[in-house]
């Protein structure tokens, strides 16, 4: 059910790859809630062509941008402001990639050239997006920027590997930039720490089936789905959350604050 929570708002959504993507689900919900959006992804991801389906449904232009290239981001903000005829109200950073995980390198055998690329794509990119917008004065006062993260930034999850370090940095950037953008334009910057979700990036984690099943059993409410995540993000882009900034917000059905659940105890008791 739509409530027009984003009526009149204009947003940029990074990272919709296919219909499972958290960004894809969020784009649909934002438009349902009355927003106008621009979609963006890396040129290589756009070549798959899937995003055109979403663009059609959302009546949104697709503007290519690699998050590691500042000129791409400048072009994205310039073209988006031309399209909207004004500044942007919200940005979703839904981007992540681990070169070492992709190449099958474990956390105790990292290739550091890969690691630097991983950090650049998955963490420093949030700073690059924010700094580009800040210097171009591209976001309206009381705007909202959200990046997606995972609890491996706080707790050890062995197979999440170097992405844990990337997420810790991403959350730190949200906090630090949130201060500066808050002072300048009252723009809020937060991260949302989402349950494991079956998407292309999610399924790249080794043993993802076990991972998602464990989280489901540990969370009093069960895992939050991609559509649940989209709903939550809509609230964070809306005017209902104007004083929330510099936070890492758990959206995980209670996983992060559960020590152990009966479901896990029962399963282990049977061993
Ligand atoms: P996804 O694979 O659908 O999305 C990842 C996106 O990053 C893709 O669209 C990809 O094209 C984009 N990307 C990669 N390199 C890029 C670059 N250089 N420039 C621009 N875009 C680039 O997977 P998902 O799960 O929707 O991931 C979105 C975000 O959510 C990621 O930050 C991920 O770490 C985070 N997240 C995912 C969880 C999961 O279990 N799926 C759980 C918690 C957080």
Image (cartoon, helix red, strand yellow):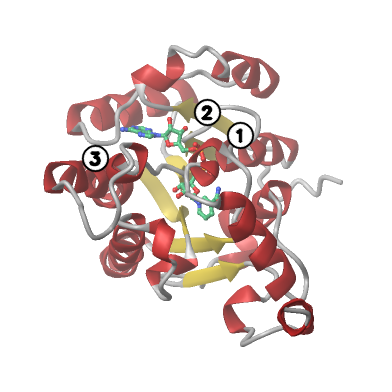
* Residue at mark 2: C-beta within 8 A of ligand 1: yes
Q: Give the CA separation, mark 1 to mark 2.
A: 7 Å
Circle 2: element type: loop
In which quadrant is the C terminus drawn? bottom right
Instruction: Write down the residue under mark 1.
Output: 24
- In-image side of 217 versus 233 (left or right): right
Q: Give the CA separation, mark 1 to mark 3.
A: 27 Å
Residue contact at pointers 1 and 2, CB within 8 angstroms:
yes
Residue 65 placement: quadrant: top left
Instruction: Write down the residue under mark 2.
Output: 17
Question: x, y (%) of residue 37?
Answer: 55, 31
Report the residue at 58% width, 37% height from top: 21
What is the number of callouts on the image? 3
Residue 115, label in figure: none
Crowding at mark 1 (Cα within 10 Å: few <14, some 14-19, many 20+): many
Circle 3: element type: helix
Question: x, y (%) of residue 182?
Answer: 34, 66
């Amino acid at each position: 059910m739509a409530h027009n929570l984003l009526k009149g708002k204009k947003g940029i959504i990074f990272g919709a790859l296919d219909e499972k993507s958290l960004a894809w689900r969020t784009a649909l919900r934002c438009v349902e809630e009355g927003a106008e959006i621009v979609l963006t992804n890396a040129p290589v991801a756009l070549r798959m062509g899937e995003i055109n389906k979403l663009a059609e449904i959302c009546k949104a232009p697709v503007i290519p941008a690699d998050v590691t290239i500042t000129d791409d981001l400048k072009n994205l903000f310039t073209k988006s402001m031309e399209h909207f005829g004004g500044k942007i109200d919200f940005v979703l950073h839904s981007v992540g990639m681990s070169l070492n995980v992709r190449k099958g390198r474990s956390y105790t055998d990292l290739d550091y050239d890969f690691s630097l690329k991983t950090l650049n794509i998955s963490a420093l990119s949030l700073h690059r997006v924010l700094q580009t917008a800040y210097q171009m004065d591209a976001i309206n006062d009381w705007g909202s920027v959200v990046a997606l993260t995972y609890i491996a930034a706080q707790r050890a999850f062995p197979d999440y590997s170097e992405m844990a370090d990337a997420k810790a940095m991403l959350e730190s950037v949200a906090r630090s930039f949130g201060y500066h953008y808050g002072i300048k334009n009252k723009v809020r910057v937060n991260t949302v720490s989402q349950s494991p979700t079956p998407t292309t990036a999610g399924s790249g984690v080794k043993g993802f089936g076990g991972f998602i099943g464990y989280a489901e059993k540990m969370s009093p409410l069960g895992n939050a789905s991609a559509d649940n995540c989209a709903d939550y993000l809509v609230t964070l882009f809306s005017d209902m959350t104007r004083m929330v900034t510099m936070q890492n917000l758990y959206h995980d059905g209670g996983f992060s604050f559960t020590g152990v659940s009966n479901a896990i105890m029962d399963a282990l008791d049977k061993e």
